[in-house]
Image (tube, grey):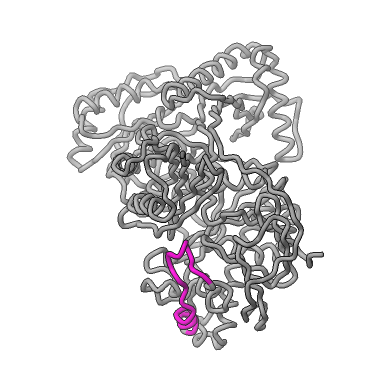
Amino acid sequence: MAYHVGVDIGGSFTDFAVFDDTTRSLHSLKVFSRPDQPGAEVMEGIRLLAERQGIDPAEIVTFTHGTTVGVNTVVQRKGLKLALFVTEHFRDVLEIGRLKTADMYSLLAKRPEPLIPRDMVFGIAGRLLADGTVDELLDEAGVEAAVVAARSAGAEGIVIAFLHAYRNGEQEEAARAIVSRLAPDLPVFTSSSTWPIIREYERTVTAVIGGYVQPRVAHYLGSLQEALKDQGVPAEALITKSNGGVMTAEKGKTDCVQMILSGTASGVTGACHIARLANVKRAMTLDIGGTTADVALLENAEPFYGVGERIGDYQIFIPTVSVTSIGDGGGSLAWVDPLGVLKVGPESAGSTPGPAAFGRGGTRATITDAFVANGLVGHSGLGYDAVRADRGKARDAVADLAGKIGKNIEQTAEAIIDIAVSGMFTEVSGLMSRAGADPRDHSIIAFGGAGPMLAVFLARELGMPEVVVPQTPGVLSALGGLIADLKNDFIETLYLDVKPQNAEAIRAGFVRLAASAEDWLTREQGFTGSRTLIYSAEMRYQGQSFELDSPFDPAVLETGDTDVLAEAFHTAHEALYGHANRAAPVQLITARVVVRGETDKPDFPAAELRPVRAEPETMVPVWLDGATVDAAIHRRAALSPGASFDGPAVVLQDDCTTVVPAGFTVAVDAYHNLRITRGAAA
């Protein structure tokens, strides 16, 4: 026997997806997350897998894990007390940033306090020019004085980010050597080794975030490795990355900035897999957990990528799967403001105390409580019987709000649901507009513990034609880790005009990156399987302020045809902005190579479709769309490929509940996905 285990830790539950190599079957499990003791939930899950499903830890050959330790460290501001060494006269780099307000629509908006206060920022004499040549030698005595001052101020680590270090990291490395000599107990982080991107603030804040979280992430990963070893798990732990790939936990200890947004990326990776199986060309993923609703857009089963994603109040400028938080999660609390207006979120009940219906001490109504109060959720155990929903407690919590707004319990619960959907509608509409996408051309792939509960309501408001609910939606993020490839990004700033005389310099830059990519995959990850190198260049028209990442065929590097390379940029520019100026000169700012090592993946064969009208297990009265109606209760496990039924209906399964209003039909496809569309089944 051999098992592949994927784990994803959310705000309320920790999800497990287990693929059995022998039976080719997929098992899943949920346990409560333990923010008070990160890692304990992983060990509890392994114990329960052995107890309930007979999975021997010694037979786990793959263990992939998505963690929120890094994100939580930043959000809770519990990282290292850092000092920052910068080029003299540039001490305000974190204070100034990009001179953007935190909220452009608020007159009272304030920018967040930097992770490193100004009195812990030290200017060092020494200057590089924009091309990386030395204009002024590094003041080594100044570095030594800064080390002494930083230590006396209580610094627990030092970040070094000098001007133009993306072109030449020698001065940063020289300063690192001095710090290591004088204070060997202090961890040191340089911007050129963290992520050597052009632009001072972006490079600096990325290095700061990496240094801020590194000790806690490294401690967590080390503890995880030891715990797995103690449990008898032989597999080396893999960590999901922000770019949708995975890397070893050992590498993650020192390169944690690359996996700081691993959880959200895993979900999108899993959704891409579902989109390929379901042959969905355009989709929006909807991942709703206990705290937030996260969305991403897919085109031909591939996600969009970007930089500048937010971690709490701060942006981090590493390549990530583009995921946007658009609304509330199942645990988001409903409340009434001083003017008597009912509102939902952003505060969440989390896993402790959780929704009132969970009976873990919560007394305030959440979105989940609204569904339970109206009879739409709670007809079986939730989270693999981790909890049983108490409808009485949910109604009591909603009743407290009902008295404040002058409505009955059912109306108030439905209002909570409507407000949550309305907020998501607004955010999704804006996201679609910015992307130039039409929601009427996109399906929703709904997952997370609360995604299938809310997805059809959102699709109805947006006019989206279909909702796809995977076979195990509650643990799709964990499954995403199982099917992710080893993946890493490599960049080098070249800053060259795209002209024939620079063709060799451009080619040489990409050759260096390709060599680094192969070395990372083979030596650091120990991978010997099939791999792919993906080439792109961040280019711009001469005089523009920002670049556009433009993929191209690497064969052009050998031919030296810079016109073909420039055309790749023109094409990308035209696709995004609707126009291109092919007569304008083009600059190549940053070369990029992405390496992907193709891991062994579970094989999910298609089943034979046997059309049949599914008979409900029972009918129950629920409050839906302003009235009490009878809804059909279906068990997901009893729905075979080819089965169909109409709403109003509720589909029960171990990891989530799917709610289907009237006017929609559900059909089970060959891969056991629920395909929910408008209209009645034939």
| Residue closer to the observer: 21 or 631 | 21
- Vertical order, 230 against 254 (above or below): below
Could you tell whether 580 is left or right of 337 in the image? Answer: right
Left or right of residue 176: residue 420: right
383 inside magenta stretch: yes
Residue drawn at x 55%, y 72% is 377
* Number of disc labels: 0
Question: Image point 52% across, 57% down: which residue?
Answer: 103
User: Could you say which quadrant of the image residue 553 lies in?
Assistant: top right
Q: Where does the image place residue 373, in percent across and percent down from the top left?
A: 53, 79
Residue at the spot x=75%, y=70% of the render? Answer: 663
**The C terminus, quarter of image:** bottom right
88 or 371, which is in the foreground? 371
**Front-lying residue, 9 or 227:** 227
Residue 26, image x, y percentages: 54, 48
Please identify the quarter of the rendering in which residue 547 is found: top right
Q: Is residue 629 visible?
A: yes
Please determine whether, in this image, residue 181 is positioned above or below residue 423: above
Q: Is residue 488 magenta?
A: no
Report whether residue 113 is seen.
no
Q: In x, y percent, where is residue 292?
A: 51, 59
**Outermost residue toward the right?**
682
Q: Position of residue 566 (x, y in %)?
A: 69, 23
* Range covered by the magenta-colored residues: 380-399
Residue at coordinates 57% horizontally, 77% vertically from top-left? 375
Residue 458 figure quarter = bottom right
Q: Image height check: is 349 above or below 574?
A: below
